[in-house]
Amino acid sequence: MGAAVRRARLARLRSPATAVALCLASLAGAAPVVMARAAAPVSAVPVTALPQGLDRAALARDLDAVRDAGMYGAYASVRDGAAGWDGATGVADRDTGRPTRPGMEHRVGSVTKSFTAVAVLQQSAAGRIRLDAPIGDYLPDLVPGERGRRITVRMLLNHTSGIADYVPRAFPSLARGSAASLDEFRHRTLAPATLIGWGLDAPQVFAPGTDWSYSNTNYVLLGELLREVTGRDPEEVITRDVIRRAGLRHTYFPGTDPLIAGPHAKLYESFHGLIDPPRDYSEYDMTMAGTAGALISTPQDLNTFYRSLLRGGLLPAAQLREMRTTHPVTDDTGRVIARYGLGIYTVDTPCGPAWGHDGSVWGAGTTALSSADGGRQFALGFNLGKYQLNDAEGRPVPHPVDAALDRLQTRALCGAGVPAPLPFAPPQSDPLEAPLAPPSLSSATGQRLR
């Protein structure tokens, strides 16, 4: 998704109050600005070449170009059938110069949503969850009354519920032009019911089922749905039925432990220049994200997960079809620029559609995309968040890192002999992918945190 879904909703937002709320709205798992090209309509990108082989030397050069463009460090994994390439570039620790390594563990943010969705669909296959049943049938105390009767499980999965994101309530200082909340709440433990309550207390974004709006509250509710129908903690269910079933070795929920257990990079957050110099947030209590975005993984594990998923290893065929049944995501002109399914989305590349998800938390960006059959795959993590500066209207200014990431992603997914990436265009502030600054935050105040 990089730019595709990122541009989809904020382009339609005009009022400052709405922009503030939605610019903050994806902390728990939203995604970084990774694919920064101008989006073409989903059905309009010509497929002019099929993926061809792995040019490992070229991939390494493209990854180094991301570092040279200003990224602290990055690590990636590319697969083409049985062939593979793993690479790393830059530094894991800005102060010591410790280098990154392939396979480092990383906070993957909203990629967690794919895992949660798979667990829900597994319970649907077992007859315990009906996708078109009202969520109030299962969680009447959490989503009571008319809202609980009108919002279905499917609407939570594909972000058409209209439930607001809880993030503005979770980090209130951001709306005041201060990043103090990030540090104040570094070791705060939050219960899922608290997050859900914040989201439900906010005004409904639209009538259920009538539009699309990314909300982390949806996926925290889905975690509680798993708890209700299984009688177990949702993180345990996802670990048992998804992570272990896929054979993943370095993917886990940290619970209340603020540390990343394995070898990892420090995760530096810039917040579009508000935090200067960027500060390390690799130590963080991720109960603020839960089943919406708390997962830790590696690029290699993410490729294994999506390959197993897309090839039918985690879901029966009927549930996989449901997962890949999408809702259009449009820009302000009504043009479809991506399609969101049930915890997974599809965007077009120069060599055809790609499926996956991306995510970000403070200091960490992740993207994971695969060809439709899971044969060709790309997963990437990097450790400098929201590196673009904002212009006077709150839109990130084009950054060389965006173009470098775009070139890397195109080569990783499409191989040699494919067209050049689509023309570079500056990414816009996006509530789907990252907890961005309000439009006038740094430009209006001129203040940075030191």
Image: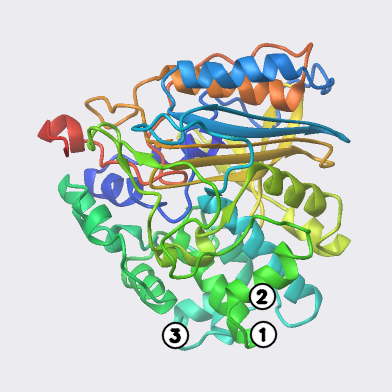
- The residue that mark 2 highlights is 237
Q: Position of residue 328 (x, y in %)?
A: 61, 45
Q: Nearer the viewer, mark 2 or mark 1?
A: 2
Using the image, determine if residue 163 lies above or below residue 38: below
Would residue 65 appear left or right of 267 to someone viewing this image? right
Q: Earlier in the sequence, mark 1 or mark 3?
A: 3
Circle 1 SS class: helix
Q: Earlier in the sequence, mark 2 or mark 1?
A: 1
Q: Is residue 231 visible?
A: yes
Identify the image quadrant of the C terminus. top left
Query: Between marks 2 and 3, how big is the CA–CA gap?
Result: 28 Å
Q: Quadrant of residue 116?
A: bottom right
Label annotation for residue 230? 1
Nearest the viewer among 434 and 324 is 434
Q: Is residue 134 visible?
A: no
x 41%, y 42%: residue: 267
Q: Nearer the viewer, mark 1 or mark 3?
A: 1
Nearest the viewer among 69 and 410 is 69
Label annotation for residue 145? 3
Q: Quadrant of residue 398?
A: top left
Report the amino acid beneath label 2: Val
Local crowd size for mark 1, using a 10 Å CA cut-off: few (<14), some (14–19), many (≥20): few
Nearest the viewer among 233 and 132 is 233
Circle 3 SS class: helix
x 79%, y 11%: residue: 417
